[in-house]
Amino acid sequence: MNRQPINFNADELRALDRSHHLHPFTDHKSLDGEGGTRIITHADGVYLWDSAGRRMLDGMSGLWCVNIGYGRKELAEAAYRQMLELPYYNTFFKTSHVPAIELATKVARLLPERFNKVFFVNSGSEANDTIFRLVRHYNNVRGKPQKKAFIARHNAYHGSTMASASLGGMAGMHAQGDLPLAGIHHVLQPHWFDLGGDLSPDEFGLKAAKAVEDKILELGPDNVAAFIGEPIQGAGGVIIPPRTYWPEINRICKTYDVLLISDEVICGFGRTGEWFGLDTFGIEADIVPMAKGLSSGYLPIGAVAVCDEVANYLYEHGGEFLHGYTYSGHPAACAVALENIRILEEEGLVDRVRRLAPYFHEKLMTLADHPIIGEVRSVGLIGACELTRNKKTRARFDKLGRVGLICRDHCFNGGLIMRSCFDTMVVAPPFVITEQQIDDLVAAARHAFDLTYQDVKSEIE
Ligand code: PXG
């Protein structure tokens, strides 16, 4: 993309950023030293540019969301047209508008048949907060007020609001804000690399599923409302459960009348090579939160799809659900999401993910022989490389996350954006990535791993 250099003083901007901008998930002290923030100025396709004019391959699709890639004029035009036509109106009080109606219909049709109702929100966090209330309300209405507990997994990520951070299993987040809220219980995550020990992945998958059943039995099935899980844990480090896990979770949730929530905020809209992660793993979900890929991040929007059984019961008996956001079903965001889905469909981008998946996997696997890489895994266009100091025992480096950050910086400096989740290096590139760009991504990752190896060589066993 040819662009004139942007006329500003990056150092001045960085100073203003430091003075006035409170960033999410940032220790602001880390911005005081050399460098400060990296100011991103523009983007096209799979590439981002910073204020120094450096181009970077965005291996993370922004924050797991810009699935159709950057620079799609059609989405900007959809927002522009909609803002001229009807920039805002709410969907409360028996009003509606065309983009919200069309998008609800479209999302329902993309999901399995038992999903016909969609509630709009502005983010994944709001989606999960909505579900937390909706499920409690549902069980109150159906005369089971004691059936309230939620079971979630350690190291899950479901958002940053009070309920969604509580559903998440990030200990550091819980410590800030005195979470989790009462009634939310965390169990073993299906993370074979760290927790599988001597078990085979399949055996470990059953063990992790059994932890859910054990928790249900401990609390009493009459007290457990729902289980929530990401098909693949994203922020936790692209944790792909062993294939034994989800079928067993389906069985357990059915047995104990526990609602199954498949958090599709990252997996939804094609990331795994099917429209939803639940399609890839055969998850028999009852409620589906989504966000990110719904609009490829061009405007904020999320949604909650509710299966017929729950939605119909609430229709008959629930009355008014006293819940909603000013921007639930924002017309411009809905119009952008519709255009995003049109592009996904017409350009066959979900099929493209499925087609590229074996190539992506094979190329990533070439990194498995690296002396600091203990495991490489991927599904669709989402993958991870585990940093380890001992390839045999899968031992972690001291101070979990330290080496991941070293590696992330080497990636950045080499023009590749890869995220470190503790000591797991993860990638989730835009669906429009080419085979050549996958080669570039893997070459840049190998280079970063080489440099990281040099830095921590003395710790390798
Ligand atoms: N569920 C899942 C599975 C997510 O990944 C959320 C819910 C919350 O969505 P919102 O739109 O409220 O952010 C997410 C978000 C990271 C990172 O560092 C991941 C997310 C958000 C911020 C950082 O990997 N995922």
Image (cartoon, helix red, strand yellow):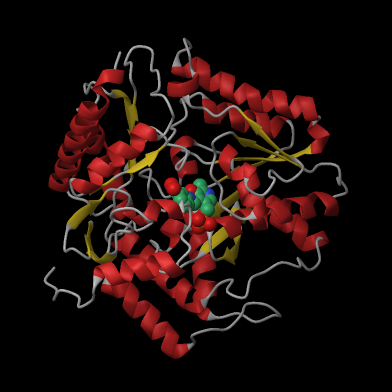
Q: Nearer the viewer, residue 235 or 250?
A: 235
Residue at 42% of width from left, 90% of height from top?
84
Q: How far across and down, in percent of the image, does residue 311 sit?
A: 70, 57
**Can you tell which quarter of the image residue 392 is in?**
top left
**Can you tell which quarter of the image residue 101 is in?**
bottom right
Q: Is residue 82 above or below residue 40?
A: below
Q: Nearer the viewer, residue 12 or 107?
A: 12
* Residue 264 visible to the viewer: no
Q: How far across and down, in percent of the image, does residue 178 sit?
A: 70, 46
**Can you tell which quarter of the image residue 32 is in?**
bottom left
Residue at 14% of width from left, 73% of height from top?
3
Residue at 59% of width from left, 37% of height from top?
171
**The C terminus appears in which quarter of the rendering?**
top left
Residue at 46% of width from left, 9% of height from top?
198
Q: How far across and down, in percent of the image, does residue 186 sit?
A: 65, 34
**The N terminus appears in which quarter of the rendering?**
bottom left
Q: Is residue 12 above or below residue 358?
A: below
